[in-house]
Image (cartoon, coloured by chain):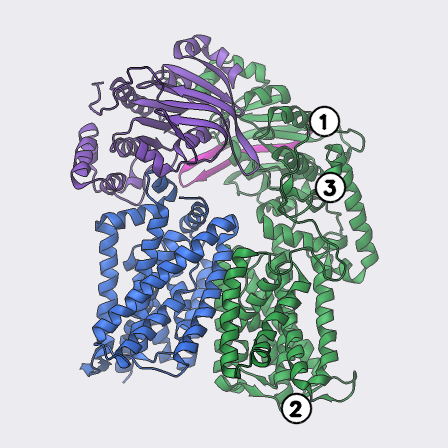
Amino acid sequence: MAQSDVLLDRPSASGAPLLTVEGIDAGYGKKRVLDNVSLTLGHGEAVAVLGHNGAGKTTLLQAVFGLQPVWGGALSFDGATLMGHSARAAVGLGMAMIPSERFVFPDLTVFDNLRVSAAGLSEAARSAALDLAHAEFPILRERADQLAGAMSGGEQRMVSLAMALMRKPRLLLLDEPSLGLSPAIAEQVMARVRSLVKGGMSVILVEQNIPAALSVASRVYVLRAGRIILEERAEQLAARGREGWWELF
Amino acid sequence: MWLQQVAQLAVAGVVNGSFYALLGVGFGIILGVTGRFHYAFALVFTLAAFVTSTLESAAGWPAALAAAAGLVVAALLGVAIERFIYRPLALFSGPLSLLTVFISSLGVTIAGVNLITLIWSAESRTLTLVPLISLQAGDVTFTSLDLFLVATTWALIAALALLLRATDLGRAIRAARGNPALARIMGTDPGRIYLVVFAIGSVLCGTAGILNGARFAVLPDMGDRPVVFAFVVAFLGGTHRSPFVIGIAGLFIGLVESLSGYWVTPQWTSLVVFTVLFAYLILHPLDLRALRTLVAAARLSTRRA
Amino acid sequence: MDYWFDILNLVLIFSIFTISLNLLVGYAGQVSVAHAAFGAIGGYIAAYLSAKADCGFWTVLATGTAGAGIVGVVMSLPALRLAPEYLVLLTIAVSSIVLTIVGAVPALGGAYGMVADRAADLSPLSGGELLFPHQWVLPLIGFTVFTYLVCHRMGESAFGRVLRGIRDDEVATRALGCNIFATKVVVFGLTSAFAGLAGVLLYFYNQIASPSVYGLNVSLKIFAMTIFGGLGNFAGSILGAAVLQLLQPMLEKIVRLDPGHAFLIQLVIYGLGLVVLVRVRPQGLLPEGASLWHWRRRPQATPATVVETDAPAISPAGASPSRGAGQMDETILKVRGLSKSFGGIHAVRGLDFDLSRGRITALVGPNGAGKTTVFNLLTGALTPDAGSIELLGENVRGLPPDRIARKGMVRSFQDVRLFSRMTAAENVMLGIHEAAAEFWRWPSGTRGGENLVDLFLRPGEARRVEERARTHALELLHLVGLASFAETPAGALSFGQQKLVSFARLLGTDADVLLLDEPASGIDSRWVDGILDLVAFMRDAGKTICIVEHSLHVVERLADTAIFMELGRITAQGTIAELTRDPRLAEVYFGTV
């Protein structure tokens, strides 16, 4: 796939990480979901967070993005400490997130979905963003008046990617992008993500589908019952083979 | 002759139905987007009428200006209630916020309506919007006010539909209504959207109150029955549907109420309406999408924006 | 002096309204703004019968109360499945319907209502007519005390525990085997009957029954009084009625306002009071469980979290034997051809599997394989499209969740779902039902406090059953190592402790089949061992267990066999070791490129 035009961040010359998560705990009510979780992400790096359902992967993304209050530990993005930030602040800092479900506005048209993502931008910035989206995903122009809810899963994922990219984020948080998709369509989505990464986008990818994650990420973390039990390079995890993977889950 | 009688009742049904449509659309947008069971809708309704009536008679303002002022007051009251009463309460009550917001809404209405009585006294007041002329089309008679009401109501409903469909604000509102979690992820501020929605709903509500005051009288308890009709129409139409759909539901209620007058005396017509509501509640399966969003909106509003 | 007696009398009559509404709203969690309308039914029946049929006071009272009760039962039927905001709407509709009818029927006096032509005559009691306020005081105190005693007995019994369960978590209550529909019908019927009683008294007291006496705003006023006094506290209901009824007289006497102004200002004050109260002290003047007379308090629901101890050790002594000691490995549950689709998508297709006594079977598979749907189908939360479910030889397909629970199949929830305002012991007790075979033990076919017949007519029996339940609950809490937390509100326990209490609760149901949804998730690792030991212990004690767990690590430690599901079908069964050796399953589970 051609290298994406969406461009981004100039990698930091000093090699300092873009995102640092240090020893965070988080949960809902009494239930602890994350236990002393740490993670780093460099500029232009793609990292995968793997684990079984309920291991805490989504909660981790939500904590980074400001949707989940953190009980302890620290977060920093591009050098600046994040404390009790809101999703709105996260967007302002240059993060974008695509949730695993309900990632489009189903009763709005494709065009309206894109317009909502561009809300708050100036007129010029908005049309630039829309042009960008249409350039990346020509299908959106054709389907502009279709209700997003009526599109197929794969098409909706493309819309959601377009929505996320419109504000030229520096960090993309993807929650199970291959969920519910057939292998062929999932591969298309992953290919898109790969080209974004090639273009310099920093990505944290949460996945249950290990091969798909390995095709995108250079480093992986494995989460089990709220704890990081493994961190290694993608090749190393691949080398374990499926027999080895059962051990981790 | 019966055709003439039915036609006359139908006209009355259209007029009343348009009034109910306005109520339902105003209440519905508030309930659909914010999940608040805004009983104080009745208070906004009443205050708008009182302000307009007073400015007209005591201060001699022209009708249009007085009405405009009434609507401004309505909007301000609605927004203030959301900002200072509902929002802090919802943040505090978490999962119980549906009940507590309803209770506080009740309290505000009781206090507010009686404050109005204290300030203005309970005597009936009048409100004139348009010079009252009797009109006729074929065998049916109606007034200029009736015409004005129907025209205003549907103009407002159309305006809201246009706003929702074609403006950025409208899109943001529909996004927040249909998928509040994603709206948050996109960075919109749900609190701001709620205030706007309350302003819009209150303007529609205030218009209904002023129209009601012009048709009948301006009294402190004038909001009691209309607020119930607002709920009925909003639930029947579906709080997630377009204003036109809710509007049609209102028209339907108005026509059912009016046409049943062909067979029963006027006291019984509201019974027909409530029986329709009762039947709907028994037969119609829960509107799951709206309910889910209500719960989601209530939950979202319990976290800091 | 009569002035003050008059106020006292009105406080007493309204207390009957508020106490009964409190049982409905505060204990059962059903929000109704139709209470005064039920009063209207009672009041108008009274008016009609005394005027047209020349009936005596007691006949009229009984008829009015019964009439209101019957209408309450009728209203409750559509209300059973309604969400709270729809229920409020329904009660508004009922109120409007009732008031429109009484206001429109000419025989009932239309908008002006019916005026009484004679005073209440309580003979054979007290002799003579009640003409003056001071004569009403004692009879009204009698009625109020009666209402209080009945409602208090219901609220503080096992029946009341079921009501509170319905209030806090209807789904969980049902899943434990409580017949919530029957309970709701009973509570609606009874509370409406009491409202009818108050309505009759109000008619005789005021000597008039008219739509405005019982209008929606009166219902709202009663609702406000109940909230004020404190939901879940009957003494508070009396207090709430008193405070609000006294506002106006106090404004007149002490602040020296004229009656017109006093009336309005009183309303402004209580409206504002309601707004402030619901924000500042939502539990009302008196919190649930507090008692003015005994100073005995039921533990409050939101204290700070209990210090988390190390995972308690389970104590095998006192284990509850499985119903009907049976052979280990005996097939307890047979599922054949189970299918369910949602709008064209097959969630579950043609499932065949067995669960046996003394074995732990795990359901594993990738996301969306249908594992949770299976649990929902087995417990009756969802109705299957096809297939059979045989529990101990009996077909349970299509039965509601509470029936299936009582037949011996229960489930735990991923998010635990304890009743946070009840103590650990009460939580466990809600799962314990002592069965009764006689059909007239209604509403739940149980014996003891849950059954109103026993509660009122055989208090000794009710007490004995309750004690047995309590002892059993404490034994179970001892088993899971939490005996010292028996009186702690469940909301104050840590998540791991809550999980243990929920297992104790499940054991209390004495069910044979336990479906555990992610038993080891969400807890700290040091607790996991304790939980796993407990589940293994339950298996060894003869329970039939099926778990859904996403952590294969846990499954490996716990499960005897595993069932692998893919897109709604079972594609493999065997031990975990066998399944993980299969390359194709690995591909399905981890995904293909």
Which hue belongs to chain B?
A: blue
Q: Quadrant of residue A62?
A: top left
Q: Residues within 10 Å of mark 2 (few under 14, many from 20)?
A: few
Residue B303 x/y as whole percent: 45, 44
- Asked if the magenta segment contains residue C205, the reply would be no
Residue A244 x/y as whole percent: 50, 11
Disc 1 chain ID:
C
Going by the numbered disc 1, the residue's amino acid type is Phe
* Residue that lies at the very extreme toward the bottom in this rendered image: C117
- The secondary structure type at the circle numbered 1 is helix
State yes or no: discs 1 and 2 in contact (Cβ < 8 Å).
no
Q: Quadrant of residue B236?
A: bottom left
Q: Nearer the viewer, mark 3 or mark 1?
A: 3
Disc 2 chain ID:
C
Disc 3 chain ID:
C
Q: Which residues are magenta?
A: C330-349
- The span from disc 3 to disc 2 (Cα, nearest Å) is 57 Å
* Residue situated in front as seen by the camera: A218 or C183: A218
Reading the image, the residue beneath label 2 is: C118
User: Disc 3 or 1, which lies upstream in sequence?
Assistant: 3
Reading the image, the residue beneath label 1 is: C537
Residue C2 x/y as whole percent: 67, 86
Residue appearing at x 44%, y 31% in the figure: A63
Q: Which chain is green?
A: C
Task: Say whether residue B167 is left or right of residue A235.
Answer: left
